[in-house]
Amino acid sequence: MDSARLNRRGECEWELPRSGKMRVPGVIYADEALIGAMDDKVAEQVANVAALPGIVKASFAMPDAHWGYGFPIGGVAAFDADDGGVVSAGGVGFDISCGVRTLLTGLETEELRRVQRELADTLYQRIPAGLGSTGALRLSPKDTDAMLAGGARWALKIGYGRVEDLERIEEHGAMSGADPAAVSDEAKKRQRDQMGTLGSGNHYLEVQRVAEIYDAEIARGFGLEANAVVVSIHCGSRGLGHQIGTDYLREMAIASKNAGIALPERELACAPIRSPVGQRYLSAMRAGINCALANRQILTHLAREAFKSVLPEAKLDLLYDVSHNTCKLEEHQIDGGRRKLFVHRKGATRAFGPRHPELPPVFRDTGQPVLIGGSMGTSSWVLSGTERGMHEAFGSACHGAGRNMSRTQATKRWNGRQVIDELAARGILICSPSQRGVAEEAPGAYKDVTEVVNAADRAGLARKVARLEPLVCIKG
Amino acid sequence: MPWEHFPHGADIGVRGIGATRAEAFEQAALALTAVVTDPSRVEGKRAVEIAREAPDDELLLADWLNAIVYEMVTLKMLFGRFSVQLNGGKLRATAWGEPIDAARHHVAVEVKGATYTELAVKHRDDGQWVAQCVVDV
């Protein structure tokens, strides 16, 4: 991106000044190198979002921002319903509530190394991964509705997980305001046998070691120690979330066209929050959030069972569960007053700071854990929310690295076997049903997540706490 | 080449090219299958009928590709041959395929759906029709 059109406001903060139809300025958090490498499309999409009705403060882009669907991936924007504000299906993204949860095993790396292969094989056997894989559950229409209303709480009720998991999930395990009736039958049918499955693409379950601690006090608060073993799960609401996104994007696009609203991109289609379709979308999207929370809860149970048979002393206590494709009603400080806003985070993680009333007591002093997934074979990160971040981009941070190479280019450069062997030589075991999938997800096809995390830390969006390195990766 | 892929950030673009709009739609569907597997590996053992209606060509293309994604997921099938008939904003089609066999089909990623990014149905200067969009994987 050409930085000449931006005003530099700090080491890692750039302003895209208001112009044309923009109602608010754009703000991009990145260092000079990340800005230089960022697609010009990001600035264009940030400006398009800034022109939507009811937007408050600014249209934000996180350090990992890249060209998305209407909104940039890594985009954050808040809207005030009292001011004609809108909700956008493209502003949430297709994989509703895709996110990361991390579990603490209580084990040290050496204990894990002794059974690494056996554990990898057991996890791979138990965790359904890849295209066409199905879970053990078959949901009846009644079960589906209960799942969509209850999220992780529903999963717990039917035997998946522990009651103490709930307070360590955003929304305490169940998003309120979900309405299963707002979700199409097609969406529900796509999910019938997909509960407790990882999916494919960049979704995974990883066993990781804590490679480095950056903030010892907060790390202690999170239960993280150097060389400790953790498990991270990255996946979302599967086919159901995608179908909700598709259904409502279509409806909003046709409604915009019929109303004579010219959109620079169809995926910017949106509806006033206070309109029937806006309300229905919010109810359906919240049901999609519950589907993702239930899915990660079931996968957690499967991971615990796999560990129990190989390493019975492992605890697998939940550290936290965060989502990075959502729209949530939150209260924020704006110009000295408190306002309730609909905050879209599209490829951006919530990062609430210390003493935020939404956080469970255990995170009151530390801020919430902000879990940043890496790509296969690369580092992941644990950050914490900060007070400053609450005043920057509504308590939001980056979500991952993003690709620097297309899938086609990646398969031309690598083959799956070669990637698996190279990672094995570095002590990282990859299990996947798809060799081509592994080649497409090769570590070299992704940007370096560390640069993104450093920029988020320096911009004050979140604080670096620990870096994680993979030991085992179950890949869809 | 009657179909091809084009790069897009984290995802992938599918493009069908043909002498008619309907042919371009058929080829775009093959490009969609090729994201998952080599279409020539898929045998046409079973036919599935698909019908859709949309207010314009672009939305109809997205609806068509999304209908195939839906059938792939719910029937657990892959499709290697398509026949499309277009009549104004209405599409009637048949897709021939077989159940997914992960080993034989060497499947890569799952397609989650068609998006409206780079979505276009156009008549090129050389007389060929092009039907394309980015699909989310």
Image: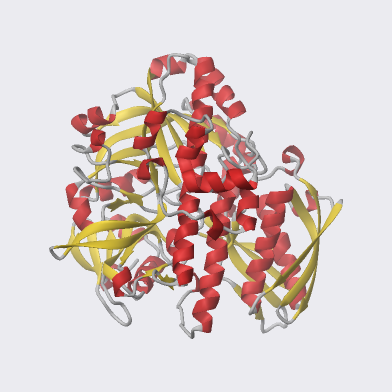
Residue at figure coordinates x 50%, y 53% from the top left = A95
- A272 left or right of B20 in image: left
* Front position in the image: A323 or A216: A323
Which quadrant of the view contains residue A416?
top right
Residue A254 place in picture, x, y as percent:
55, 76
The colour scheme applied to this rendered structure is secondary structure
Question: Relative to A82, does residue A422 appear above or below in the rendering?
Answer: above
Residue B135 place in picture, x, y as percent:
59, 60
* Front position in the image: A404 or A102: A102
Question: Relative to A70, does residue B32 appear above or below in the rendering?
Answer: above
Q: Residue furthest left?
A: A336
- A257 left or right of B103 in image: left
Q: Is residue A334 visible?
A: yes
Residue at figure coordinates x 29%, y 27% from the top left = A224
Which quadrant of the view contains residue A197?
top right
Residue at figure coordinates x 65%, y 51% from the top left = A189
Q: Is residue A404 visible?
A: no
Which quadrant of the view contains residue A302?
top right
Residue B103 place in picture, x, y as percent:
73, 37
* Front position in the image: A107 or A337: A337
**Total marks drawn?**
0
- B94 left or right of A81 in image: right
Residue A195 place in picture, x, y as percent:
58, 40
- A55 left or right of B125 in image: left
* Front position in the image: A248 or A396: A248
Q: Residue furthest front?
A: A142
Question: Relative to A293, does residue B24 appear above or below in the rendering?
Answer: below
| Quadrant, the N terminus of chain B | bottom right
